[in-house]
Image (spheres, grey):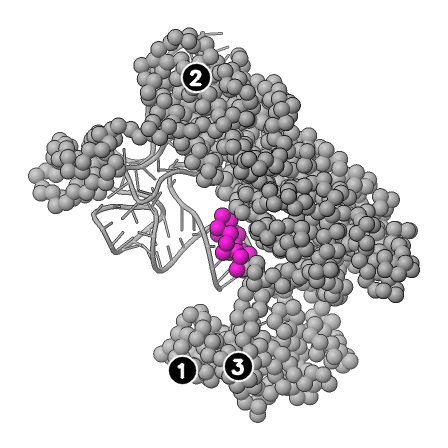
Amino acid sequence: MSRYDPSVIEPKWQSAWEEAGAFTARRDPSKPKYYVLEMFPYPSGRIHMGHVRNYTMGDVVARYKASCGFSVLHPMGWDAFGMPAENAAMERGGHPKDWTYGNIADMKAQMRPLGLSIDWSRELATCDPEYYGQQQAMFLDMLEAGLVYRKAAVVNWDPVDMTVLANEQVIDGKGWRSGAPVERRELTQWFFRISDYSEELLSALDGLANWPEKVRLMQANWIGKSRGLQFAFETVGAPEGFERLEVYTTRPDTLMGASFAAISPDHPLAKALEGDPKVAAFVAECRRGGTSAEEIETAEKIGYDTGIRVKHPLDPDRELPVWIANFILMDYGTGAIFGCPAHDQRDFDFASKYGLPIPPVFVAEGTEEAPLAEAYVPMKSERVRYVRGFAGPEVQTGDEGVAAAIAHAEANGYGKGVTKFRLRDWGISRQRYWGCPIPVVHCPACGVVPEKKQNLPVELPYDVSFDQPGNPLDRHPTWRDVPCPACGTPAKRETDTMDTFVDSSWYYARFTAPRAATPTVAEDAAYWMNVDQYIGGIEHAILHLLYSRFFARAMHKTGHLPQKAIEPFDALFTQGMVTHEIYRTTDDKGRPVYHLPEDVTVLAVADRRVVVLGDVPPPEADTIADVDAWIQGLSDEGLLVEVVPSAKMSKSKKNVVDPMNIIARFGADTARWFVLSDSPPERDVEWTASGAEAAYKHLSRVWGLCDRIGQMPADHKGAADDDLRRATARAVDEVTRSIDGFAFNKAIAALYAFTNTIARADASTPVMKEAIRTLARLMSPMTPHIAESIWAHQGGEGLCAKAPWPKADPALLVDDSVTLPIQINGKRRAEISVPKDMPGAEVEKLALANEDVIKFLAGNPVKKIIVVPGRIINVVA
RNA sequence: GCCCGAGUGGCGGAACGGUAGACGCAGCGGAUUCAAAAUCCGUCGCCGCAAGGCAUGAGAGUUCGAAUCUCUCCUCGGGCACCA
């Protein structure tokens, strides 16, 4: 025990844990279980600091819970399907499978030195046929249960890559990879019926008490419940079959302000009218625009008057024109609306453009009707005066007006109140190779036929090529050709694969029985589910977590999960990012050039922080002017680096720190300590070289302290044993409460303070040893390797990782006397030390007798005195 | 536009309505050293010689007492957004 050398102790203890099988999860009915899970990574090939932070947090929880006596499940796997593997194959050759498994091996090799307490025997990759075969089995069960269906849907189609693109893959109306203008094309796709669960997924959010409020709110907004009126207009001059036009509105109270009706270009009525070349041309024009967010936002409102008219339900003599308008969405409500330009900005813009009337329905209380320059849209909770009302009192809130209008419609039989959701069914078809094949067969005789379960997995063929665009499965010479599972005649496999979000929607359940021949095993799922603590990035707040919540319900319905697991994640924690400042210079053309942190030098010059390129010695300067001149000189030579405030680590900005470099230099414990130390876990943490060094120095100090205590003579007597015992108890208490509350930064702060206390303590050898053994136990969730070394050195029994968590003696947590600050009129003026249970009346007497108090009172009479036991005394004069 | 969240020293951040700034970084002073690095000790919100005063984005309010609760405003961050 001489020098702190992580490169020696870290591999040593990792082997010791492995040999002891310390982290193998076992179903143990005699113990309570604890399932901690970090969101599994995409195998890009390199781990980054964000991974280190995420997995370290999970590891702290796993190790802490294990030492508290829980049977812990802490698995790891790979979200291994997806586009990057295919892109790599297209750009650099090679095969997605080889690329992916190679990356998994590389990343695993980078993760193991971190010393995470992971049960690697449960490792899985979603691209393992063992995994996706079970996913296919569940797909078939869900198909049978009516949770999956096919329908035609409008998608973003990249005509060059010949694939469907997600909205976020469409940039400026062009495919992100091919750069080709994206078309809106109608394709038949597979969907999960997630919208059947809209109401439940929304209301169950209330039960997720240990989820961040923010995530619950984001999901609630995404699900987007609204209450409104649905009714039908009677049409005049419409084609056969369109005698009625169903519309939906959340503002039925504005019905008297309707000046037109509008339908989506994708509405069946619009299709029926496409025989008219002018209509067809208009609809085509609407389609041309992409469906990306920006596209829609900037698109101008355009419309086409169909000549069809509808009768106003409250006044059959009044007829409104029916327009086709590009801003009406087919998949919300009924795909048709009535326009009330006075109280809806979109309708106002549209009516203004096409010269339609804008009659107000209500005005602000106490005002008169006047021409509008923009739509008047007050909060629904605000009281307004209805000038064209038809239900409820003249003056009422919007909410009351809506309720009265729905009641009026229902009473008079022209409409009914309905609830709608923004959440749409989940389209999972992807025209890609590297994904889970959808296990169905298209038979000319039988139609769409599910594959037989005994034929699963439907495995991806290896012999595919990526030298041309489109789906390799589609052009494979034989893969598609199979006999129909129903009638046996030649048929074709479905060549679409599943959205990779499906893969990640149930991996948490698979971890409970990762090698089983069924998707899950009832006993294992019953024992391990739910995930007690799930940890990951806020970027998955909506899609991944919502899909998983749906999938767990679907798995329950098909018998793959118990009822208790329909909300699979009991507690969710969303950790912040690891950031780093950016170092930038400009080239002679004025373009930014970025530099890696290791390529710059940070100098403290006078009281300024100067960052330079390369290895520049600091100046020998005496005056501020000298320093300025020196900096100016650097600037002229192009050596002065501009520092851009902290941002998410990104390769393009070169503000990345490779965890492997840090481990090589300082060891895993330092990296783990640092990512936990500086900021609350939910916030971003800025990686700084000085902070990492400080972490390393601290661990070295702890090492040295351990060494020193090890050399103390066994009979050494100290004068303040009790003080150290109390400090030890306080440290146990603080670290325990901090870890329980996910405040790892506070746990670290308490450990710093405790280390300093031990270093300065004047205590007998056994008390010192007990203190440092306790320190080792308290450090072990964060820095497990150095903790083991200290534990072993100080005579701890067995592995520190297996030792029970220390408990603080409550008697040592309370002090016999307390220091009470004394305030006079709310300002701190003095303090006194009193026995902890001294009665208030006596404390008052002592306080008033205090000479500082007398001085500050200056003879003024005391009006009131407040004694908060053990806290504070406030004298009001 | 709508809905959230956050503003505390030079920096990251602590603080059940009760001593604001724990802990760390940076800085400053000292010891050690031939010297430097490393290490150790001390100091460190601002103004002031001091007594003391001023300080938690700004302004009001509640309270004996407010970083913390309430209201208004400002700034930053995030989510959603032709969703009828």
To which quarter of the image does residue A447 belong?
Answer: bottom right
List x then y, in percent, for residue A5.
Answer: 57, 18
Judge left or right: residue A420 versus residue B12: right
x 72%, y 71%: residue: A285
N-term mark: 2 or 3: 3
Q: Single out the mark in the foreground, 1 or 3.
A: 3
Outermost residue to the bottom: A317
Q: Secondary structure at mark 1?
A: loop
x 12%, y 38%: residue: A857
Q: CA distance from mark 2 to mark 1?
A: 81 Å
Q: Chain of mark 3?
A: A
Query: Which label is found at residue A410?
Result: 3
Which residue is tagged 1? A394
Please name the amino acid that badge 2 sits on.
Lys
Would residue A130 be counted in the magenta stretch? no
Q: Is residue A60 visible?
A: no
Where are the magenta residues, as a range?
A203-221
Q: CA distance from mark 1 to mark 3?
A: 20 Å
At label 2, counting other C-alpha atoms closer than 10 Å, the crowd grade (few under 14, some 14-19, many 20 or more) is: many
At label 3, counting other C-alpha atoms closer than 10 Å, the crowd grade (few under 14, some 14-19, many 20 or more) is: some
Q: Single out the mark in the foreground, 2 or 1.
A: 2
Which residue is tagged 2? A769
N-term mark: 1 or 3: 1
List x then y, in percent, for residue A436.
Answer: 76, 49
Please name the amino acid that badge 1 sits on.
Glu
Q: Nearer the viewer, residue A132 or A345?
A: A132
